[in-house]
Image: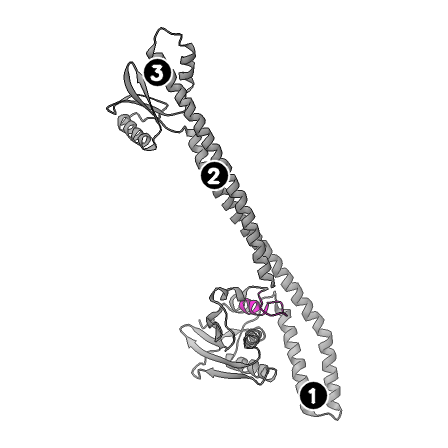
Amino acid sequence: MNILLKKRQWKIAFLLFAGIIVLGSIFYTSNLVKKLALEEEKKVKLWADALTSINSDPNQDITLLTKILEQNETTPIILTNEEGEITDHRNLSLPDNDSEKKLKKILYEMQRGGLHFEIELYGVKTILYYDDSSLLKQLEIYPYIQLGLIFFLALLAYLVFSVTKKAEQDQVWVGMSKETAHQLGTPISSLLAWVELLKEADIDKTMTQEMGKDVERLEVIAERFSKIGSKPVLVSNDIKLILEDSINYLKKRSSNKVVFTVNMDEKIEFKPAINKELFSWVIENTTKNAIDAMSGAGHLSFDLSKLQNNLCLDISDTGKGIHKKQFHTIFEPGYTTKKRGWGLGLSLAKRIIEEYHGGKIFVLRSELGKGSCIRILLPTN
């Protein structure tokens, strides 16, 4: 199981846990609102009964009933007769002008809400319409406000975590790269000395030449690692020569079952500002990834052309291909389908092309079982 899959599983588990907490909180708040709504309904019913009782028997002691009526200071109420004409209202905030129009609009909303009682006042049938109090309405929207705040805080935490994590990763990458370059220095110097001694001995020159090339390659690798974390020097270079050198090196160290095809537009004369060591590293990482996808046997093609304001390099293979949803994932650090490896090759390639050279690298096309094509774009302006 690769690192990215484990991270994804942890993220899913965290989101599920957070979702359960949010849903639980919303469910609890909704139940609380329902209970308060029932209590408010009972209070309005009690208020209506008190009003009916006062008007039915004027001679009774109305002290307690009056207190009941006076306590209703929050629930909006409108009284209408059978014809729908408004006869009284309570706890409504009405403007100084067009108060009648506003009152009719409130009545219409109350009628749509369906909260009402039928009572009898002075022997006349009266309909009492009411609505939720302002406090209850605030509680009703509270779960959504709560959800919005949780979402905002989660997003903010994610952004802060991502920025911090990226900064830490950058520091680790730079530290590892510098240390790797430093550690390679001593054995490379020793190997150079041994190659010189072998040249003086009576040994096949082709052998020492190849050994010398490999030692030079180690020097290039050490140079590449030393540049990570530092702004690379970009110099006008012949991309055709860099591409040819990289391909020739890889050819000699790949299976003879891998067929290399190189197509370069001869009209291209532009020499882009690139860092030779880092750009050749991109070619090598991308090519090795393609060879692995073909399991060491297949056809690998390199097509260099001019595309609008860019130099375009397409690296195509006849490997196993990748699913469309993985087009972006393969460039993430840690992504790998191999049993061995850290999954950093294409991630490094993306960083070198996009952050250091201002270009683009992406999967142009891929078909499962037929192969893939990686496109690299370098700006010409």
Three-letter residue code for mark 1: Thr
From the image, state whether disc 3 or disc 2 is nearer to you.
Answer: 3
> Relative to residue 320, is residue 51 depicted above or below?
above
Give the amino acid at mark 3: Thr
Residue 348 visible in the current orientation: yes
> Which structural element holds mark 2?
helix
Give the numbered dot on residue 208: 1
Side (left or right) of 130 relative to 381? left
Q: Is residue 342 magenta?
A: yes
Location of residue 248 in the rendering, given as x and y in whole percent from the top left corner: 57, 84
The x, y position of residue 291, in whole percent, is 56, 77
Question: Which residue has dot 2 on it?
Answer: 143
| Quadrant showing the N terminus | bottom right
* Labels 3 and 1: the sequence-earlier one: 3
Rate crowding at label 1 as few (under 14), some (14 to 19) or many (20 or more) other CA atoms within 10 Å: some
First reached walking from the N terminus: tag 3 or tag 2: 3
Residue 169 position in % (x across, y down): 61, 60
Does 110 sit left or right of 365 as displayed?
A: left
